[in-house]
Structures are given as structure tokens and as C-alpha cells.
Amino acid sequence: MTRSTKRVRGIAALIATVGLTLSACGTTEDSGGGDGDSASGDGAACDLTLAFFGPQTGPAAGLGEPIINGAQLAIDEYNAEAECEVAYEQIDSQGSPDQAPSLATEAVGNDAIIGVVGPAFSGESAAAGPIFSEGGLPTISPSATNPALSENGWDTFHRALGNDATQGPAAAAYIRDTVAATSVFVIDDASEYGAGLAGIVEEELGDTVVDSDTIQTGQTDFSATATKVGSSDADTVFFGGYYAEAGLLVRQLRDSGFEGTFVVADGVKDPGYMDSARDAAEATVITCPCIPADDPAVAEFASAYEAEFGGAPGTYAAEAYDAAQIFLDGIAEGISTREDMLAFVNDYDEAGITKQLTFDETGEPADVHVYAYTVEGGEIVPDQEITS
Amino acid sequence: MNFEFLFNNFPELTITGLAFGAIYALIALGYTMVYGVLQLINFAHSEVFAYGTFAALWTVLALGGDAGVSSGRGIAILVAALVAAMLVSAAIALLLERVAYRPLLKRNAPRLIALISAIGASFVLAELLGLRDRVAGWFGLEESLSEYVSGARINRSMPTLLERKKLFSFFGYDVTVIDVIVIVAAIVMMFALDQFVRRSRLGRGIRATAQDAETAALMGVNSTRAVQVTFLLGGLMAGAAAFLYMLKIETTRFDVGFLLGVKAFTAAVLGGIGNLRGALLGGLVLGVAENWGSALLGSEWRDVVAFVLLVVILLFRPTGILGESLGKART
Amino acid sequence: MSTAVSARPKRGAGLKGRVVAMPKPLKITLWVLLALLAYALPLLEPPIISPPGTDFGGVLFTVTIYCLVALGLNIVVGYAGLLDLGYVGFYAIGAYTAAILTSFHANWPLLLALPVAVAASTLSGVLLGAPTLRVRGDYLAIVTLGFGEIIRLVATNTEWLGAAKGISNIDRPPGPALFEIPHLNWDTGTPLLDFNDTTTVLQFGVLDQIPYYWLGLTVVILMLFADRLVKDSRVGRAWEATREDEDAAELMGVPTFRFKLLAFATGAFIGGLAGALYASRQSFINPLSFLLLYSILFLAAVVVGGQGNRWGVLVGAFLVAYLPERFRDFADFRVLAFGAALMALAIFRPEGLLPPRRTVRAKQMEQEIDALEEGAETDGETSRA
């Protein structure tokens, strides 16, 4: 008896709940409330947010951290002087394309977000790109280098660094002309960045390439690769990939007796490389489409970064700083809608700390110079501009 | 298929393969022992290894490892790093047993749920390493410990402790000190463990529990103790593996255990899970096969070679090369 | 002893008992209401449940994909008792087949590519299962783990499969955009209809993830019906027999190998379907979506939910897909929180959140036997467990 009344009561409650949710809701229109126009007068715009989109946790988090910090630094500097602060939201994709569409959709739905620094990787860029494009939310990636990304017709897509197709030929030119290599061994890490870059270098160098090998990110023992390099008698090794594997690889190459030149690209321009390779890092050649630090603005960034985060800026930190700076300049000018921001970014033409920041119509940086750096006494020092 | 290259560099590929395989083998011991006793895949064993690598790294950093091994101090540092790695790994293994396994074993829970518990524990342990700067920050130690906790998500390395001195030539390949130390140490450890499990009282307890836990308990074997000792031994071996790994690779990161753990587990199954000698054989076979495969097909197929080898061997020897036999160990 | 026996009717009197006792029309109405609620969930955007910082519709789509995968894996693990640690391999084969046929090497419409994708993954299930299912127990786990890794590595290193760059512009499902439904807006604390934020039914666009969720949910419901039919058929009973005691089943005339292969193929079928749907929503895939980690998460969904119980694995799938998103507030610590949650679930609900009926029965039986064996003095203790 008690049971059956309980049951009836339960069902009644359920029906009531459903009914309540269906009937009790009014519409947002009757709640009114105009909190729309925040941009007032000629001053800087208020209540805006910049977002970082990339890995904050998970295996790729090490690459996300300098990007997060670089953008953070730009925003902190802006907020120190601005009347209304710009908020900073970190959207953690773990570097995987899986959640990228949901995260991008939410970012597009959040009207406060006016610009995105990211997505960090090419994969997540490919997954999230159409959504940002549809939502009209401008993005500037500090680190995605797959050349195909700018060919999708997404008008919101920009990147603050040269893609593989600009850096690859420069690296090849350096190996050919400056190193004067006669036999090159090309290694890549099977990532979209590393494989893309190594492929271009291999193509450009043609017959000078004696052999190639592909490692996998996350591996730590490269003895088979070292054996191959040793038996090929190559005088130069080019590695397309990130600093984590580069550090391990160069150490094992040197241990196995390789004495030639080790050439890498911007994915290795990170203090983590010297930390991990230690003495073996000496004389490594690093190509990078970024201005050397003898420029005062660049030096200032480096010292501010070190003061704030307790270490020299890592890979793509400077690019992230530049990307954020572009948006912040727009906000300072009073831009408060995505449409205006997109137009502003497209027309932008200022000196950044990595390069002259201006984009062509596909969102590629229009003015890219590639420089060669070498490692000397545990420091990355500028060598020369590469002209091909 | 580059047979010529494989043939010309056969000795070098084999020796370096054996050296890395020896590390697989030592990690595989942990998987194999726990499996032998509990029939559980101790998924979090990879983290036991990872903590060992950090213990070795931190010890070397703390003692200032630039001394070189020729000096007495250098040798002291090496020994300290080995001891630290073994102790920390053993402690983590015991902690795992206490927190992630014992509550389940007590309730006689299904075996698969223990796997899930271990997976959860593995996430927690790896992420804790990846967040060690933040954890240190809670105690206000971020500054003072920065040498140890900074760069929590990226590779950390230690200075070269042992120069790669050439010891002797093996068919044209100059075998280095590291190769010899790693291979010999793994075999010695293996032998010691094998003898311990066969001859000691505790070892008999482990074997009895592995054979038939209930009967063993009736015969007066403290099965909780036997399980604990199993985890302890697995942890000690993983710590030794971590030390040897750091000697050879000199670099570690918070998720170093994942890939190595999968490989070591593969090695354990390859040799015959539950079988100590099988773990050694499986590890060595896997290490060598990976190097030969990389030479033949390119390093990108290294892991594929490893797994294809596993599938092929299991098709012909369904319980691994040596078969499973922790309990049935011949005396 | 008496307490242990009387525990049985008490259990039956739980929520489940009450639902079972209802008249049929009422039951059907309840189910329909529940389904409607599930469909309406992303429109209601209820506070607290809605995860912060990510799109609720998109997360729910992921949940439905995990639900599908969990239903498929449940057939392999829960019904047939085969431990599969490489399930992501089938998921990848479905996704890659759909991607190649609709974008990379051909221009098929999705609806044509979908059956091929499913057929390909089913075939791969048979091809993998035929030689390896003779291997027993945990050996199968490592073999399947190897299979999943091989699939991913082949995709990473083969230019023809897009290598690390992946494949983009995968076809989205076709759909006549029908009509718009407004969302609820909770900003003011009370639910309000928001006509600025609407979802168009059956429009599979770029920005709105909800139609994909509805598609996914529909497939899940269809699979639930199919699952029920199969489980209660001769096939389901054969699986159960094989799982409980393979040798005995074989002696009783159940061709266990063939049924195991069937379970494997059925699981691969559903995995491939889930993969193809995922690829279509994503419109882009690369090997990063098919890491070993996902096989582990899929297995966690099945085991945490309660292997062998279709509702249980759905709950498990929901938790595994949803918790990491819900934990976004923890920022850096969310993976750690998720790991801790997995451990806690394992330790406090070792049978799974919703164990299948036979497990509950078996547990009761065990207790009764214990109680009989130990006599009256320990009575109170046993009935408590």
C-alpha cells in the first residue's frame, strides 16, 4: 500500500517537473536588459577576452606552456596600463583534434572572446578552423605550420610564423651554401610539422641527401637511427621535429661518433633543447623565421619573460606574444566586435618582436625572413640571415 | 627492405638492441610477477618506473653529477642514484598495492575492475609528476626546488655520468661501457631475483600464492604479505631499470613510463607472462627485433615490428616463448 | 540466515522493481519521456550539468559516440568475455574508410561511404579475430592492443592515409534543414527561451553541434534495441555460456570459436560505425584521435559502468566522456581529477555502477551460502555486505 502511493507520488513529481520546465520558461526577450554596447566613445574597448587555444594538459602540454605564457605576458603588459582589463581564457584542447570542434563552438558562442591565440597545432587547427571561420572569430596561430591550413579559404585564419614551405627552402639553402654539405642525412619525427619540413628540405637538397629515417614522437632510444647515420658517413644531419626528440637524438648521435653539423628548425629553438642535450647541443644550427635578440624590443621581451616565468622564453613564446599584441592593439583602438577585429588584423602592419607583422590575403605572414642561429656555450646566438 | 645495411651493421644493431632490451626486461619483471601472483595486469607499473627515473635524476642533480666516474665521488653518486631509484620505485609500488589493489582484492572484486583502478592510479601518478611545479608551489617551495620541479611537462636531463668509453671491439663494433653495464646488470639482477623467488622463504610464499592462493593461505602463507613482497620486488627491479635507463638515455619526462610500460608488458607476454626467465628473454628479443626491424624497414616501423612479432609468436606459442610458470617454477 | 534471505525481496523493491511492476503503457510512456528528455538536454542547457568552457552539444555528441563504442565493446568484453585493449583500431578503420571515400581519394556522399566503412571494420574484426581468438584470456588483450597500435602507426606513416597531416573536408551528413528550436537561457537564474540561440533540426552545419548529437543519440537508441534482441536470442545465450566456461560450452555443443568470432565482428561493426560518425562530425581526422589511450578509456567506460549490462555501460560511457569536460574548472588538474575518479569508482563500486542482473544474483547467492556455512552468530555481518 505504502509502496503504491509512493509510486504515484513519484510519477506525479516527475510529470510536474517536466511540465514546469516546459511551461515556466519565458523568453530572454522579456527579460530585456541592455548590456550590449560596451564600446563607448574613443577609448579602448571593455569587457573583452582573448583566448588561448591549445594544449594545457596531457602529453603536448610542454609545447603549450610557452605559448600560454607568451600571450599572458602581452596581456599583463596591456592590463597594467589600460583602463579596462582584457581577460585571458585558456582553452585546453590537449593538442588533440578530438575536442577541438566543441571547444571552438563554445568559444564562438562566447561573445566576449574577440580573438584567439592559437590553435597551437595544425591538427586541431584543421578541426576547429571551419568553426572559427563560420563564427567570424579571428585566430592567429603562433605555431601551426602546415602549409595547407591557409588554403581552406577560412578568412579568420592567420598565423604569426612562416609555414614549412617558407622555412624548408631556407634551411636547405643554408645547408647547401653555408654548411657546404656534401652528404646530408634527413630525419623527421612523423609529426605534421617535422615530416612536412623534412620533406621540403629533402626535396630541395636533391642528390646531396644520402639517406633518411623517420622516428616517432615519444620514443627515446634512437640507436638504430644513430647506426644508420654512422654508416651513411653523412657530414650533416637535418632533423625536422621538436626539441624534446632533438635533444635526445643529438646526444645519441654524438655518443655514437657523429661529428658533422646538426641542423634543426624553429621547433627546437627552446631552452629545453640545451637543457636536455647539454654538451651535445654545441654548434647546432637552428633556423627560425624570427628576428634575433639584438633588437631592443626582442631583448626586452626576453628579460620580461624571464622575470615573470623564471626561465628564458620557450618555443613559440615570442610568436604568441606577437599574436596577442595584434589583438591588444585592436582593443586599444576601441574595436569591440569580431568583424572589426578581423578587418583590423587583416590590415595590420607593425613591427613585432619576431617579424614585421602583416598578413597576406590567405592569412600567411607576408614578410618572413629566416635567420640561422647556432648554439654556443649553451646559448642560442644569432648567426646570419638566410638569403636564398 | 635494406638487407645490406642490416647485414653490414649487424653487431652494432644487435648490441644496442640488447642493451635497450635489457631495460625492457627489468621493467617486464614487475608486470610478470604481479601477473603471476594475482593474474592482474598492473597497468600503473609504468609509473613505478617513471618515478624511479626521477629519483635517479634528482639524486644526481642534488649531488652535482659533473664529477665523472673515475673519481671516488663519481662512483658514490652512481650508487646513490641507483639506491634512490630502487627505493622510490619500491615505495611507489607498495603505495599502489595499498591504495589501488588491496581494497579490491579484499572484496574479491572482478579482475577487470582492478585494471581500471590501476589505470586511474597511473593517470594520477603521471599527472602528479607533470604538475610537480604546482605541487611544490603549494608548499611555497617552487623557488628553492626549481632545479628539480621546473619544466615539469618537458624533458629533463642529467649530465653525462659515464663517458662512452670503448671497452672492446665486437666484430667491428666498439662496445661501450654503458652497453656492458646495462646488459650485465640486467642479467645479474634477473639471476638474483630468480634465486630469491626459488630459494628464500618469502619467495616460496610468492610461488605458493601464485599456484593456489587459497591453499597457500591454508598452509600458513600470509597472502597479503606475499602480494606485498611481489610488488616490492617488482618495484625494486623497475627502479634498477630506471637507473640503467637514465645512465643510457640521461633524459626523462613525466610520461616517460607510458610507452616503455607498453613495450615492457609486450616483452613479458612475449617471453611467457608469469615467467621470470621469460621476461628476460622477451625483453632481449624485443629490443633486438626492434633494432633489426628499424634497420630493415626504417625506424618509423619500429613499434609495428614489435607488435607484429608479438602476434606472430603468440600464434605459434600461445603462452609465450617459455610459457607461463611463476607458480610452477622448476626447482 | 533469515536476514540474508529476506534481503532479496528488499532489493527487488528498489527503483527497478517499481518500474518493472508498472503497467506496460505507463512504462512505455516513461521511456518515451526519458528519450525526449535526452533529446532535449542540449536545448535545456541546465546549469551545473552543462560543462564550463566547452559546447554542451558537442560534448553530448562525444558522449553518444562513447555510448556507441561502449555498447560495441560491451558485446566483446561484457557478453563474450574477451578482453579487448585495441578497440580503437576498429574505430579508426571506420573513420579512415569514411574519410578516404568522401574526401581524400574519392568524392562519395557520406551515406554511401558509411556502409562501406562499417563493412571494412567488420571485415577487419573477422581478419583479426580468426587467427587470434584461439589465444586465451589476457594474451588476447595484448594482441588486440598491438593491433590498435599497428593501425595507428600505419596511418601515421602512410602518405596514402594522410600521414600525420590527417584528412580534412570529410563529408557531413546530408539533411533538409527543417525548423528552428530555441534554446533555454539560464543567465538570470530562471529558465528563459532564447530566440537568438536556436538549433535547426537536421541541419548538419559547422557551428551547431546539436544535430550531430541527435543523430548520434538516434543511432544509440537503435543499437539498444538491436542489442536487446541479440542478447535475448540464442546468440546471446551462447556468448554467456562461452564466457562463463568455455570448455563446458564447447562440450554442450556450442561452437565457441564461431560465437567468439561473431562477437568480435559485431563489436567491430559498431566500433566502425562510431568511427565513421565521429569522422563525419569532425570533418577532419588525424592519427592523434586514435591513440592507445582511447582504447583504455573505452574499456574503462564498459567496466566502470558494469560490463554485461547495456544500461550500465551507457552510464560508464557518459562518465568517461563527460567527466574530463566537466572537470575543466580544475584546469591543469583535470586529468588528475579524472584519474582519481576512476580509482574511486573502481574501489567503491567494484561490480560497476549498474552491474548486470546475473552478477547481483550471483553475489546474493554467495552471501546466502556464506551465511549458511557460517551459521547464525555471524549473521548480522554477512547480511550487511
Image (cartoon, coloured by chain):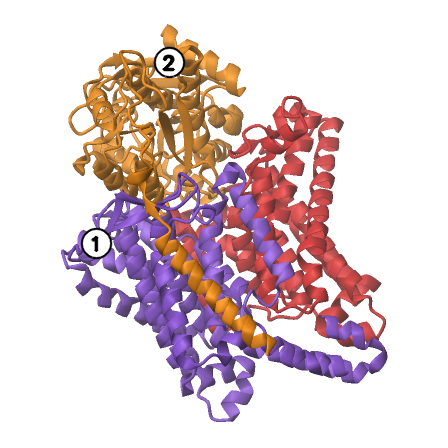
Chain colours: A orange, B red, C purple
Neighbours of disc 2 within 10 Å: few (<14), some (14-19), many (20+): many
Chain of the residue under label 2 = A
Q: Which disc number belongs to residue C172?
A: 1
Numbered disc in front, either 1 or 2: 1
Please identify the quarter of the rendering in which residue A185 is found.
top left
Judging depth in this view, the residue of B10 and A11 nearest the camera is A11
Q: Secondary structure at mark 1?
A: loop
Neighbours of disc 1 within 10 Å: few (<14), some (14-19), many (20+): many
Say if labels 1 and 2 share a chain: no
Judging depth in this view, the residue of C171 and A77 nearest the camera is A77
Residue position for label 2: A382
Which residue is at a point 60% across and 28% down the rendered structure image?
A: B159
Chain of the residue under label 1 = C
Quadrant location, the C terminus of chain B: bottom right
* Residues marked 1 and 2 touching at CB (< 8 Å): no
Quadrant location, the N terminus of chain B: bottom left
Which residue is at a point 39% across and 21% down the rendered structure image?
A: A86
The kind of residue tagged 1 is Arg
**Residue C246 x, y percent position in the rendering:** 53, 83
Q: How many marks?
A: 2
Establish if C277 lies above or below C363: above
Please identify the quarter of the rendering in which residue A135 is found.
top left
Establish if A200 lies above or below C117: above
